[in-house]
Every structure is written in structure tokens, then in C-alpha cells.
Amino acid sequence: MHLGCVIVRLQGCAVSGIKAHAVQTEVHLIQGAKFHLVGLPDSAMKEAAVRLFSAIVHSGFRYPGKRITINMAPADIPKEGAAYDLPMALGILGASGQCPVDGTDEYLIMGELSLDGRLMPVKGALSMALFAKENALKGCILPSANAQEAALVGGIPIYGMDDLQQVVAFFKGKVPLPVKREGKNSDSFHISSGLDFSEVKGQAEIKRAMEISAAGGHNLLMIGPPGSGKTMLARRLAGILPPMSFEEALETTQIHSVARRKEESSELLESRPFRAPHHSISDAALVGGGAQPQPGEISMAHNGILFLDELPEFRRSVLEVLRQPMEEGMVTIARARSVVDYPARFMLVAAMNPCPCGYQSHPGRNCSCPERAIERYMSKVSGPLMDRIDMHLEVLPVEASQLQDKAPAESSEAIRQRVVKARWRQRDRLRDSGVHSNSGMSKKQIDSFCALDSVGSSLLHKAMDRMQLSARAFDKILKISRTIADLEGVENIKDTHIAEAIQYRNLDRKAWSA
């Protein structure tokens, strides 16, 4: 900072995806009467001159009658939104001698100003706090509404400010207390959704498959007539997933911090997300996008479940954009000026009818659909997408005798305990690899951890030949077999595990038998 030449520099950041990058606000005052803002500002930033004048005057300070030049560096990074109002205002006050400038560049300073000088909340406060911590800054100066969220990071002071006057008082030595709350020390979180598998009558085979899906993080497709319980089962799957670690919770909250509306809660997300978009959703809403790229539903479901009910009713173009994120766990949104990455490691859970009328597989009702109509209906979901779904399950209606059975079914908590034990085995096996579940194993890891004996190998090779399975389906069967073995607590995959895993490639078996 060089007050003598009337240049003030303050530290801020630009949030791209969920990562924050350094942005320095440089303010220069000389004789004149114009306001210049440079450094790739968007339209909201270009309107800052009006907000800054009103906020500075209403806060009891003097707006300098000089030519004000503000540069947002580096100039090649797009700057969006009004979150840079506060550093710009402080820069003007510092350059005009109304606010101390020593040490201001040692803090991350961000906030939107109202016309009367109050500080309004901004998006991405969690990413901003992480940036400040990683860059060893002294603390973060943010609007009070963002302080609780930013303090989740822990290890760095967060100063929640109400208005411009309070920020200036801070640098004059009247130091307010930082937010005391820091990142939680708990290793994991689990919040019950209130939906329990004990409420589901019958469907023992489907529950078993869903337990395997949860234990290994495997994608799942349920096919069955209306009323067979597909949606009911899917909504209870989140209740048996293992709890998130603090690192997972923090990363998930970062995504929601970037996307959330200002009035939404800034608490740490402690339960895994469950997102169920309507089939009318657009490509951009599902994957993410917009003029100012925002995360889509697949990123909002990061570390949780993306449930697509009535799968063939989604536009084919919408479904096809899922293919790459399902493989890579990341979605990349390219724009003319920037490329934004959002994490998207989710479990895809989908449900569909077997035909347009819905009753092709119903044991007691006749299907009225012509064969050609059934083929068109099933072809709405492409083969490449179907091949990426690990488990295909046929869900049949529950018999009346099972619905009237008063005996309590197994609870979600009992199932979850087995799932958690299986996940711990996987994390121990895959430690230091960045992979947390069997579904994410690479080809090299599959070769290392999914070795088969001669019986199991022969069984899988026969299934490959008879069912004409793809190489991807071959790997998925091995991953599912590994998960079944983990649930049993055994290290070696047996032929029974392979046989059960093959049963979960329902559509492949039907295509072969046809």
C-alpha cells in the first residue's frame, strides 16, 4: 500500500466453480471527476459507482471529488456480482485518507453494499474463507449474514460486519470479536430423513440390492409397474447411506454455498443430499450452466443421491449429458471467457415403467402396448447410459398377504450399520487413492482388489459370452461382487458373489434371453 502516491490495494477473490482465485482491488485517485472501473467487470459491478457514492455518503464519510480509477487484477479473470463493493469502498476511503490503509491487504475483504452502507450477504462465503486460510491471511471481513457459514472452515478468524462504518472502525483499532464457531471436529454426520425401510412391506430382494448399492456407491435402476414401490424405496435409500465425513460435508456445503439464494440457511450440510428433479428439467438446470455458470442438480447431489423418476420421460438430450459426469465425477462448463468445474460424484437412482401403459411385467394385469411401442419406450434411454448404470432391478407389486403382515420389517438403522462397516473396509483398502467406495475404482484397482478364483472366473466368462456384456459391464459386475464380499466381511470374492452380481444386470439378461 502506498498512500503517498494515492494507490491502495486490498485483497479479495473470485469464486469460479467452488474454488476461489485471488483478486486484488487497486484504487487510484487523481485530479478529475470521473469513475473508471477496469478488469473485466460484469454489469452488476459496472453499476458500483452509484452504490458506492450513496453508501459512502450515508455512512458519514466524504466522497472524494476526484477522478477515481479502480482496477480489479488480474484483468483476465471475469469479475461478477456486487461482492466487490466493500473492497472498492474501502479503497476509495483509504486513498482519500479517511481510513487507515496499513494492513488492509492482509485480510480477505468482500461484501455487497446497500445504498445506506449496510453490508448485504454474498454467495460463496465458504470458498472465500477456505481461500483465505490456504493463503495464510489474517482473517476474513465479510457481511454478518455470511460469518457463520465462513466460520465452518475453522482455523481462521471471521469478522462479521454489519455496515461500512463498522469496517472502517475495525481498521482504526476498534476491533470487534471474531465469530467463535469453527469447523466441527466430528468425523462424520448422520441425520435421519424420517423415512425408514421398516415401513416397506415385502420387497426383500430389492432391499438387499439397495443395501449393496449403498455399500458400494453403485448406480441403480428400478423397473416395475405403477404402485410397486419404486419411489417409496428410492426415497428411503438415503437413510442407509454412510454418514458424511467432515471433508465431504464441507465440500458439499461449498457447492450449495455458491448456488444458494441469499435467504437460505448457511449451516453445514450434515446429511447427504437427495435431489429429485422433475422430468421437464433442462440440460443446463441438470448439469449446470447459464451466462454466469451455476451448479446444476448433479452437482447439488454431490456425495448424495440423484433420483430420476420416470426416466424415459426425461428428454434424451438431458439424459445423455449425464454420461461423462457419471464416469469422471466432475462436470466442466465452458464459456467464452472462462471454464468452470463443479464436482459431481453422485449415486444415480432411477425408476421407470416397463412399457408405456406400465403393466408389461405385472403378474395380474395385461399389457395393452404393441411390441413396437414398448421398443420405442425403452429406446428413450440410450444403451451407453444404461451400460453406465451398475444395477438393473425388476420391481414387482407386493402381494396382499405381505401388505397385511404385521411383523416389523428390518429398520434402516440396522441396514445402515452393515453398510457403514462395508464402507470402512473399502476406505481402508483404497486409502490414499482419492477413492472412497468400490464404484469409483479404476481398472488398475479392480485388477488389484477383485481377483477371482477359477470357479468365479469361469462363471463370469460364461456370462460375458452368453449375455454379450460390454467391458464396462464386466468391470461393474466385479465391483458389485467386491461390495457383496465386503458386506459379508470376507476378503476373497467367491463364485456366489459373482452369481448374485450377474443377477443385478437384469436388462442384459433379458436382452440375451430375447
Image (cartoon, rainbow, N blue to C red):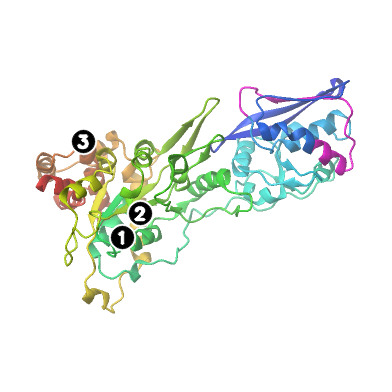
- Tell me the tag on residue 42: none
Label 1 neighbour load within 10 Å: few <14, some 14-19, many 20+? many
The disc labelled 2 sits on which kind of residue? Asp
Mark 1: amino acid: Lys
Judged from the image, the secondary structure of the residue bearing numbered disc 1 is helix
Reading the image, the residue beneath label 3 is 471
Q: Residues within 10 Å of mark 3 (few under 14, many from 20)?
A: few
Q: CA distance from mark 2 to mark 1?
A: 9 Å
Range covered by the magenta-colored residues: 52-78
Residue 187 visible here: yes
Between 241 and 274, the one nearer to me in the picture = 274
Q: Is residue 258 left or right of residue 344?
A: right
* Residue 259 image position (x, y, % from top left): 55, 45
Q: Amino acid at mark 3?
A: Ala
Residue 230: mark in rendering: 1
Q: Position of residue 3 (x, y in %)?
A: 85, 25
What distance separates the C-alpha of mark 2 from that of mark 3? Answer: 28 Å
**427 drawn magenta:** no
First reached walking from the N terminus: tag 2 or tag 3: 2
- Circle 2 is placed at which residue position? 309
| Quarter of the rendering containing residue 83 | top right
What is the CA distance from the residue labelled 3 to the residue labelled 1? 29 Å
Q: Position of residue 282 (x, y in %)?
A: 44, 43
Residue that appears at 46% across and 46% down: 297
Helix, strand or loop at disc 3?
A: helix
At horizontal 11% and vertical 40% (from top left) the residue drawn is: 461
Q: Are marks 2 and 1 in contact (CB under 8 Å)?
A: yes
- Between 51 and 179, the residue placed more toward the observer is 51
